[in-house]
Image (tube, rainbow, N blue to C red):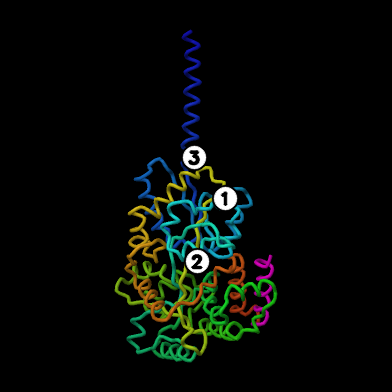
Amino acid sequence: MRKTTGVVLLIALLVMGTMSQVAFAAKEISIFISMPEYADAIRELINEYKKVKPDVVIHYETTQSDYPTLLKVKLNSGDLPDIFASTTGKEIELYKEYSLDLSDQPLANAMEKAVRDSMADANGNGVYGLAIKGNYFGMVYNKGLFEELGVKVPETFAELETAIEQFNAAGITPFSSGFGEWWVFKHAFQHFLAAATDNVPGLVQQFEQGQAKFKDYPELYENWFRFVDLVYANGDAKPLESTISTEIAALALGQAAMVVGQGPWIEADVKAIDPEIKIGIAGYPVSDNAAQAQVIAGADQAMRISNSSDAEQEVLDFINWWYTSDYGETWFIDVAKVVSPIVTDRMADFDLVRDGAMQVSERGSAPIGIIYSTDSFHMSFGEIMQAYLGGQLTKDEACAQIEQKWMEIDGQ
């Protein structure tokens, strides 16, 4: 009897050990997202959550330059993380079949309406993601340099060329471009797209269907290329090697007056170099009409929850805590220092956030055009623009390739 009891006990212990391992595995959450500029803030968020759920292990991975490609590799291999990222707009629908609808979760009620709307599918239904931030896009500039030299913040091409001449004469590089990053081009290009039409999603769809050409729109065929040519000629010594880090350092050290394709997400790093720097954000000069020099506001990124996650409840507990707890509210404002995606009366104490809000209040905002195309298209767009600036393509060849990629990648 004792021998039998011992065997039973051993089996029970083995079963309990196996169950314990299974239970522990079910409490592991994997996160793979873009936006590495928020890595430190997210790690702080994860560390705080350990105090709430010490038995939940969160594995966090981030990248930017090749994120769309790496996400597809994970997707095709069946290794989709519990939390992954996409842009809003078109990619909400693209990844809908892999994403959990969060409309019945407490976090959905905590979202700002504009953010929640951007997480809906093509029919305006569901909540298929959550945002780290709202955002402002524009031309970030060194206010101190502009004030010191008496340079007007440019709103038109004529004013932009004057500003370039003034900075060059003072021995200050007008631009740091970031042209080594594919996504810098998409951030800047959307301002010219907004100037070209009152219906950005409609025009994008026409490009996807091969029904529109760059030459049909002077804001794209003339102004966009004129702008990147000016930046390239009056920027970094090696523009195609310039990255976000190059831009941050050049702006903070007073080596460049303006940076391209950036927004509030760079302020913490800029001020880590020079805490006293005065910086601002303005709309790009996209034409000779000053009224079109507007910042862009909106939620462009979504974090998606895999609908095949083995840790669904743990993931839901985590993201609901993130969006509805007292710490979550303070995290957006005080830690990440972003435009909060949840309903709150507070605003991050950041120059670019305050400046962006003031710009929108005084001048309105342009529509957020990057969300109507996939990041796979935007990556190709950036690579084509790099080839154009590097002299491998003429303007007409670049336009033809962009039009073709729009149809090939997003035109299905």
Rendering coords of residue 195 (x, y %) = 54, 82
- Name which residue type carries label 3: Ala
| Residue closest to the eye, 142 or 224 | 224
Name the front one of labels 2 and 1: 2
Rendering coords of residue 372 (x, y %) = 58, 69
> Local crowd at mark 2 within 10 Å, few (<14), some, or many (≥20)?
many
Relative to 14, does residue 329 appear above or below in the rendering? below
Q: Quadrant of residue 409?
A: bottom right
Q: Which residue is mark 1?
A: 80
Q: Which mark is residue 359?
A: none
For the residue labelled by badge 2, is the local secondary structure a helix, a strand or a loop?
Answer: loop
Question: Which of the two labelled residues, at mark 3 and mark 2, occupies the earlier sequence position?
Answer: 3
- Name which residue type carries label 2: Asp
Q: Which residue is mark 2?
A: 300
Magenta-colored span: 395-412
Name which residue lies at 67% across and 82% down.
Answer: 396
